[in-house]
Amino acid sequence: MKEIYHPHFPGKLILITITSCFFSLKLFSSWESSGSFAHLFFAILLLSVFIACSKPLIEWKRIEIENGYIIIFKRFFKPLKIKISESLYQVVIKDENIRSFRFRYGKYYTQVSPIIYKNGDEMTKTVTDYMNKHKISVEVVTPRI
């Protein structure tokens, strides 16, 4: 059975992205008319906020889990099909909750964090059930703070 997981983006991220874009454009036009470097500085600062916040919206990573494979789709890249039993090498746990799964596929390393996906708890359950069923042992790590 194919299970599809889409990212969940908080409304704040979308609001910050749109607002920073709008005010950045406004400050750039204000800088052109006034020549004030303070306007240019804040416009560049807001532009960098816009770029940082829009990256996850542009990338849009979608995950499919099917028949022991996890398939990672990114908007502008070829899908990456990874066999869970051969590629899962680490599980990151914080406060007794699984924060992410780390996969190694050839020269590629990728991390899937169920917390950012709609129905992420189901994703965690699907992967852990697969690990238990096939007796997969992996390294368990805690995040460095």
Image: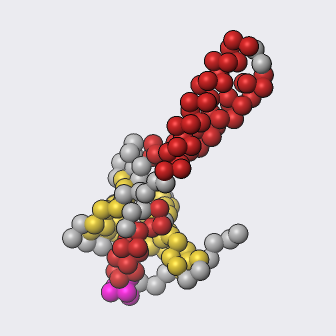
Asked if residue 134 is among those painted magenta in the image, a careful observer would answer: yes
User: In the figure, 43 relative to 75: above or below?
Assistant: above
User: In the figure, 24 relative to 50: above or below?
Assistant: above
Give x and y (percent) for residue 49. 62, 40
Span of residues in magenta: 131-135
Q: Is residue 30 left or right of residue 109?
A: right
Question: What main secondary structure does the magenta stretch of the protein show?
Answer: helix
Q: Is residue 87 left or right of residue 4?
A: right
What residue appears at the point 44 percent right and 73 percent down from the top-left corner?
Answer: 88
User: In the figure, 49 relative to 101: above or below?
Assistant: above
User: In the figure, 98 relative to 104: above or below?
Assistant: below
Residue with the most extreme top position: 33
Q: Is residue 144 left or right of residue 84?
A: right
What residue appears at the point 68 percent right and 14 percent down from the top-left corner?
Answer: 32
When asked about the image quadrant of residue 142, the answer is bottom right
Give x and y (percent) for residue 43. 67, 29
Camera-side residue of 122 and 77 = 122
Camera-side residue of 74 and 33 = 33
Quadrant of the drawing holding the C terminus = bottom right
What residue appears at the point 41 percent right and 57 percent down from the top-left corner?
Answer: 7
Give x and y (percent) for residue 123. 37, 71
When asked about the image quadrant of residue 41, the answer is top right
Q: Is residue 105 left or right of residue 1?
A: right
Q: Can residue 85 be seen by looking at this rendering?
A: no
